[in-house]
Each structure stands twice: as C-alpha cells, then as structure tokens.
Amino acid sequence: MKIHSNRLIPISKPQIGRAERLAVSRVMKSGQIAQGSEVLEFEKEFSAYVDQRACVAVNSGTSALHIALLSLGIGAGDEVIVPSFTFAATANSVVLAGAKPVFVDVQSDTFCVDPTEIEKAITVHTKAIVVVHLYGLPSDMLRILDIAAKHNLKVIEDAAQAHLAEIRGKTVGTFGDAAAFSFYPTKNMTSGEGGMVAFKEDTSARTARLLRNQGMEKRYENEIVGFNLRMNNIQAAIGRVQLRKLPERNEKRQENAIFLNQRLSGLVRIPFIPDGFTHVFHQYTIQVAGERQRYVDFLREQGIETGIYYPTPVHRLKPFSRDITLPITDSLSKKVLSLPVHPGLKRKDLIRVASAVSEACQRS
C-alpha cells in the first residue's frame, strides 16, 4: 500500500476558527483579562447543558476533579474508588485531596469501570467513587448510583472526555454529586486550557469558588485556605464559542465513527455502545489482535497518527504502585489503539485510515 497523500492525519486537531479569534480580541481590547464577566457567562451557559447545575470554571480538568473532591468533604483517611484504566489525573486528584485511591477493574467491552468491582472494593473507609466516562462513553451510572446510595457514598463523574454524552437522554455531569470537565486542546471542546465543575448542591459549589480563589469570594475577605485555580476571561471567551459549536462537532465525530465502524467491523474489535447510551467519541478506540506496535508503525508509515490510551494502568505507575491484579485493565492496556475521529477529518481521510487498518490486519 502506498501513502495517498503526504499530509499527516493527526490523532487530534483543535478546531479553532474566526469566532474564537474574535472572542479573544474582544477580551484583549476590553483590558479585563483575569477572571471576570466572561467566566461568569461561560459558567451560566455551561450550566444550561448540565440541567442547570451550579458550575465553577477553573484552570484545568485536574483542578476540577481536585476541588470537586475537596468541596464534597473528601480528605485524609478516606478511600476513593477509581478505575485504573484511565489517565493518571484521576488518581492524582484523589491523592492531592489527601485521600487514598482504591483501584478497580473495568468492563472489557465499554472500557468503563465495572460496577460489580466497585461494590467488592467498598470498605468502612470508602467515602466516594470517581467514575470515568472513558473515550466519550458514559459509565453505567444507574447501577453505580444504586451502589452509592446503598453505601452512602459520594459520586464524582470524571467527564473530561465526555461532553454532552448521554444515558437515555440524560447528560453526563447530571448523575453524581459533582462532575469534572476538561477543556484541554484535544478535548471535544477547548478553552486552550481549563476545566469546569458541575455540582448537585449549591453549597458545594460555593466551597469550590472559595477554593479556586485563595479562599475568598469577596476580595481580601478570606474565609478558608484556598488555591489559585482560576480560569481567565480569555479562556472563557474561547470556551463560550466552543460550547455553541459542541453539539455539531460531536455529531461529526459520531458520523466519522459510524463510517469507521462500517469499514472495520469484523477486522478489529470496534467500540461498543450499550443500548440507550450516546457516545461522543473523544477517542475512537479499537482492540487489535497480535502485536499492537506493528499496527502503530504501519499506520505511521502511511501518514496516520494513532494514540494508546493508556499503555500503563495507573496502579502500575510508580506513584501508585499496588500489588493487585486487574486482569481486564492489564489486558486492555496491551490491545487498545485509538484512531483519528476528530471533526476536522474529511471523507478521504477516513478512507485512508480504514484502508490502512485493513491492510495492517492482513499483515499481522
């Protein structure tokens, strides 16, 4: 097979246009660059997508997770159940809150945390569950909420990769006690950097506002010890434009995923979507047979970038090393491979990707 084009097909590509540039210019001309009215409007507009929950904008998705935990009272001596098949930020935020992450396995078809494994891991010290909606697919929130209610546990949704994903028409970020979203450049929407926390209770949201701004809502009236985790007006202005474009861009990702499904079904294990669930395809992740690196190398030769999310389970990373067995997580970390699915792809790009994967399968 020969490369059809010298143009690299990237695994992700931020979609920044004229409207975003004009929004930044507007803020720059105003001179109000720090956290201000743009941030407040962004919080209000984002709230409309998460059932009018109280939203607090911060400087990153990790900060969003961190202050979500702290605002719900999670701290020293507490155990928090998290999947190991995720980005390290999920566990980092638990440790930064002073608590202990307890790692559990995921489901082999959805890649999301296994509710049965959650229940097995609960102890007298367990105070919360962090649920990761991985790759853009919601976790099984209805079962998880039942378990949390039974054991009086807080539920935090790590929705960093799942903006507007749904379960039976209900959007992620509206199930748990709090939800954290990321606006990193590779996400389905971006503000350059940034994050958002959506809270079920207004009192928790107020605590988060204090924590993000040195412990104060009114200047020099510090109420608690806090951080500097603020989002600025430039980021918020970009985020507001991106939020308006998000539904259309998610739809484009879904269309691209359908195309790849049609071409790759039977060759590799394509993404699974349970009935009633809406996947927003932050990543289009397949499972390959044989040596994964051969696929990576061959696709790179064809000018196609791929991603491995994640090559090392969190429980095997040095800061979190645990002597535990999570067989599905360990297996998936060796099989998963993410292909380009972002809305910047053209039909000819998708054909190139599918053709290259097909040939890679024949060579493996």
Image: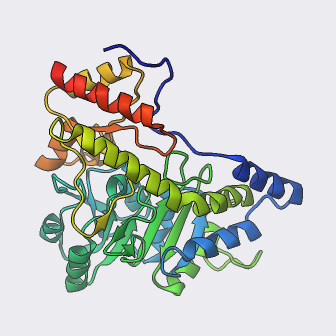
In which quadrant of the rendered image does the C terminus lie?
top left
Q: Residue at x 46, y 65 (%)?
A: 180
Q: Residue at x 28, y 79 (%)?
A: 153
Closer to us: 201 or 175: 175
Residue 323 in sight: no
Closer to us: 362 or 56: 362
Residue at the far top: name it.
Answer: 2
Asked if 155 appears above or below 349 in the picture, the reply is: below
Give coordinates of residue 203: x percent, y percent. 53, 86
Closer to us: 86 or 25: 25
Asked if 147 appears above or below 116 in the picture, the reply is: below
Give coordinates of residue 100: x percent, y percent. 31, 62
Q: Residue at x 40, y 16 (%)?
A: 3
Give coordinates of residue 329: x percent, y percent. 19, 48
Asked if 1 appears above or below 355 in the picture, the reply is: above
Horizontal side of residue 151 vs 227, given as left or right: left
Horizontal side of residue 259 vs 107, given as left or right: right
Give coordinates of residue 224: x percent, y percent. 60, 76
Residue 287 lies in quadrant: top left
Residue 127 in sight: yes
Asked if 289 appears above or below 167 in the picture, the reply is: above
In which quadrant of the rendered image does the N terminus lie?
top left
Closer to us: 35 or 70: 35
Q: Residue at x 56, y 76 (%)?
A: 47
User: How many discs appear?
Assistant: 0
Q: How is the image coloured?
A: rainbow
